[in-house]
Amino acid sequence: MATTKPTQADAENAEAEGEEATPATPAKRWLPSKLILIAIAAGIVAVGAMGGAYFFFFAGHSSAAVAVNQVKPPVFFDMPDVLVNLSNSGGERTQYLKVKIVLELPDQAMMAQVQPLMPRLMDTFQTYLRELRPTDLDGSAGLYRLKEELTRRVDAAIAPSRINAVLFKEIVVQ
C-alpha cells in the first residue's frame, strides 16, 4: 500500500467530518541556525562583560596601588635670597622686595642640571623682580601670578628640562 501525502483539501474534509488531520511526517523540533548563532554571540558578549567588570573593579585597584607606590618624592633646591628695589612710578619712597625661593624638582638628577645654570636663573629673577610695582604683589592673586611667571622663566632658562614649581619660603616688601 502506498502512502500519499495528505493535501489541504483532505484536512478540510477531515475537520468537517470531526476527524483530526494527521500529518504523514512528524514535525521536526530543530532550532533555526540563526537562533543558535544569536545565543552563542550573546554568551560571548556576557562572558566578555563579566571579564571586563572583573578587570575594572578588581584588577584595576592593585595596579593603581602599585602606581602610587612608584611616585618619586620631589627634590627641593634652595635658591640664594633675592633682594631688589621695586619699580617706582612716582615720587614715592623706594620699596624693597626680599624673596627666599625654593625650586621643586622632579628628581635628583635635575639638581645636577640646575646647579651650573644658577647665574642665569639669578639674572632672570633679578631682572624680572626689579620691574615689579608694589601693587603687583597685592593679595594672593598677585603672589600666584608671581609664582607662575617665575616658574615659566625658570623653565625657559633650563629648557628642555622643566621644574615642578617655584615655592616661596619668605616674601617681604619694605
Image (spheres, rainbow, N blue to C red):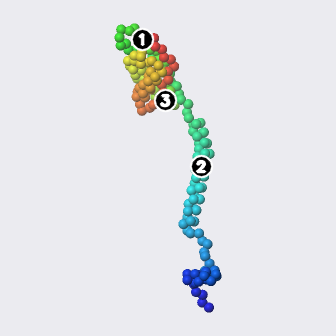
Quadrant for the C terminus in the image = top left
Task: Determine the secondary structure under disc 1.
Answer: loop
Amino acid type at mark 3:
Asn
- Tell me residue 105's x, y (percent): 50, 28
Q: Which residue is mark 3?
A: 164
Which is nearer the eye, 147 or 39? 39
125 relative to 25 in the view: left or right: left
**Residue depth check, mark 1 versus mark 2: number of the one nearer the observer:** 2
Residue 111: in sight, yes or no?
Answer: no
Q: Which residue is mark 1?
A: 95
Q: Is residue 162 above or below residue 3?
A: above
Q: What percent of the width, then of the height, locates residue 45?
A: 57, 56
Q: Which of marks 2 and 3 precedes in the sequence?
A: 2
Residue type highlighted by circle 2:
Ala
Q: Give how far apart the Cα atoms at labels 3 and 1 are.
A: 30 Å
Question: In this rendering, would 11 be left or right of 155?
Answer: right
Give the distance between the C-alpha atoms of the residues marked 3 and 2, in whole angstroms.
36 Å
Q: Residues within 10 Å of mark 3 (few under 14, many from 20)?
A: some
CA neighbours of label 2 inside 10 A, class few (<14), some (14 to 19), many (20+): few
Residue 27 circle label = none
Where, quadrant-wise, is the N terminus in this rendering? bottom right
**Quarter assignment of residue 16:** bottom right
Q: In the rendered structure, find residue 53 and report the number of the disc placed on it.
A: 2
Is residue 9 or residue 87 the one in the foreground? 9
What residue lies at 60% left-to-right and 52% top-to-bottom?
50
Q: Secondary structure at mark 3?
A: loop
Residue at (58% x, 46% y) in the render: 56
